[in-house]
Image (cartoon, rainbow, N blue to C red):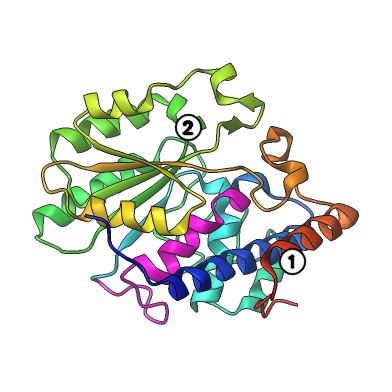
Amino acid sequence: MVMEIHEDKIKKLEEMANTLRVDLIEMLLKAGSGHTAGPLGMADIFTAFYFHLLSQKPKDPFWEDRDRLILSNGHICPIRYVAMAHAGYFPVKELDTLRKFGTRLQGHPEREKLPGVETTSGPLGSGLGQAAGIAYGAKMDNKKFRVYCLMSDGEQDAGNIWESAMFAGKNKLHNLTAVMDRNNIQITGMTEDIMPLESLRAKYEAFNWHVIEVNGNNIAEFINAVEEAKAIFEKPTIIIAHTIPGKGVPEIEFDYNWHGKAPNKEEAKRFLHELRTMGGKITSEHQ
């Protein structure tokens, strides 16, 4: 069943996603390092989670009944930080401290540094097992919160992903929804050149998962996919979200060279112009 989302709400979410992209570029420029392509591509999904889907209390980040959002591909954390700041977890001005000495905003997220970050992530392939464990425990304790695991397509190369997928399928973890950023790039090239992944749908279905494929840059479509996952009671769900790496900045879209590269001053100026032209009115407080 497709849930109708009011057009005005979708427009506001799209404006917020563009605001997050603007702040992301400004933050990466000030840091002088960090990841650009993946975070730009995932801005719509993080917007959908933090401003519509998650059951959360930003001022009470340890609220027992909160939904758990596990970020497995920790290197894209800059876009999570921007979303969290605008959602009220910490001041937007703190984004200026990304990757600085002593900051809470580490280059990979650290659970004990920043309330609202559920797990420390960095080694790829670990997040799905962590999320499955949390979902399994919640199921044992009859907890109603949901567990979401965001992961990259490149980390599907890791064997422990498939151990975790097998565990979740066997235990029918219907409270677990994984979201794969299917952007087709890795740090050294295109995924299908480095280690072909397809058919991802057939693989996850073989592990007893419900599979949904969506345009991950279409907020309404993604929200509907998450709502569909909530209606599946006999197995975990994975949403294969097809995204454009570098989304919003045409000159770097689908360019794997921007996987782990931050813009310099001139590049950032061009990127911000593109985003502001695309997004119209900028609502960012991070000026």
Say whether residue 108 is visible. Answer: no
Magenta stretch: give its range.
Answer: 39-64
Task: Report the residue marked by disc 2.
Answer: 155
Residue at x-position 49% and y-position 18%: 196
Label 1 is placed on what type of residue? Arg
Task: Report the residue marked by disc 1.
Answer: 276
Q: Closest to the observer: 270 or 75?
A: 270
Magenta highlight on residue 73: no
Q: Nearer the viewer, mark 1 or mark 2?
A: 1
Quadrant of the image for the N terminus? bottom left
Of all residues, the one furthest to the right in this rendering is: 266
* Mark-to-mark CA distance, 1 and 2: 32 Å
Residue at x-position 55% and y-position 73%: 85
SS for dot 2: helix
SS for dot 1: helix
Q: Closest to the observer: 185 or 283?
A: 283
Q: Mark 1 or 2 closer to N-term?
A: 2
Disc 1 residue crowd, few under 14, some 14–19, many 20+, Cα 10 Å: some
Q: Is residue 169 left or right of residue 25?
A: left
Q: Quadrant of residue 97?
A: bottom right
Magenta highlight on residue 43: yes
Q: Is residue 133 left or right of residue 74?
A: left
Q: Quadrant of residue 78?
A: bottom right
